[in-house]
Structures are given as C-alpha cells and as structure tokens.
Image (cartoon, rainbow, N blue to C red):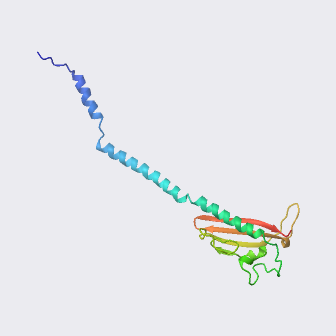
Amino acid sequence: MLIKPYVSSSLKYCKNNISKERAFTLIEVLVTIVVIGIAATSIMSVFISTVKTSADPLIQQQAVSIAEAYMEEIQSQHFADPVAVETGGAEAGEARATYNDIQDYNGLSDAGAKDQNDVAIVGLTDYDITVTVTAQSLSGTTTIAAADSRRIDITVTHTVIDPIVLSGFRTNH
C-alpha cells in the first residue's frame, strides 16, 4: 500500500504566494533602469566638469612662475640706465638681451613666455606677458620719493584662467 504524504492547503497557498513575490514586474525593472540612468548621468556630468578644470591649477601655477621669473630678471637690473640718458623705456637699439635697467622693460609685451635672451620657452607659448614700470612714491616710517622708486607690474594671461598680476617695487639704493 502506497501512502500519500499529507500536504495542507495552507502550505500550498504559501508556496504560490512566495513564487509570485520573488519576481519583478516589467514596470519595476523599467523604473529601476530609468532611476539608475538618471543617477549615472548626474555622476558623469560632475566627473566631466572636474576633468575639464583639472588642468586649471597647473596653468595658474605656471603663470605665477612665469611672472616671478620676469620679476626676478627685472629687479636684478640697474635702477637707472648706467650708460645713456633714461627715456622711460628701452633706448634706441636695445633688445631684451641688452636691457640694462628696469625702465627698459616698461611696455614689454611678449606673446609666449621668453627667457632673458628673448628666446621662446618651449611649451609656454599660450601665455601672454605684459610689463609696466611706473614711478611711485612709497610712504611708511620713511618716505621714498617717486624719483627714487619704481613699481613693476607683470600681467600674465592665458585663455582658461583669470589674469595673474604680480607687483613689486624697486628703489634707487
């Protein structure tokens, strides 16, 4: 004699409900895909904007370094022309390699960074540099007349950053 196992009707009901609850409906799957797509698009847009601007700090630091190099070069020159009468700029026949005083640099405008011999520096051609040298008095505990003080402003520009302006003073000492 064969004995049939007894299965209660409530167990059959639980089995049927469990199998129905395990599956996702097509609508649930589509909603999930849409939500994940929106989230991925948002994350990618932030990532792309970060990658686009990641070079800006490097470009800005290079611009500062260029301005500092120009300032060092200019401040190492004589205050006034040791050879000729000062004209407030480069004297006739002077080229950057032969500048001998700070006022020779007044009005200097370089498209691309150059060294003191006026030779272009490879890789820094996207920077524009302008120099102005003006007489300016200094006051503090001691006053220095404008005739004995010059303000040097160096502006370095690049298409992706705001202009960098470096200012310094040189006195007749």
Q: How many marks?
A: 0
Tell which residue pokes out farthest to the left in this image: 1
Which quadrant of the view contains residue 116?
bottom right
Q: Could you tell me which residue is drawn at 83 percent across and 77 percent down? A: 82
Answer with left or right where residue 40 lies relative to residue 13.
right
Residue found at x 60% / y 62%: 59
x, y percent for residue 165: 69, 65
Q: Which residue extends farthest bottom?
A: 92
Q: Nearer the viewer, residue 13 or 80?
A: 80
| Residue 148 in which image quadrant | bottom right
Q: With respect to residue 98, does 165 lie above or below? A: above
Q: Using the rendered view, name the quadrant where residue 57 is placed.
A: bottom right
**Which residue is at the far right?**
142
Q: Is 25 located above or below residue 13 in the figure? A: below
Q: In which quadrant of the rendered image does the C terminus lie?
A: bottom right
The percent position of residue 170, horizontal first and vertical second, equals 80, 68
For this orientation, the residue located farthest to the top is: 1
| Percent position of residue 141, x then y | 88, 60
Which residue lies at the image location 49% right of the left edge and 54% below the top edge?
Answer: 47
Q: Residue at x 52, y 55 (%)?
A: 50
Of residues 52 and 136, the one drawn nearer to the viewer in this rendering: 52
- Quadrant where the N terminus sits is top left
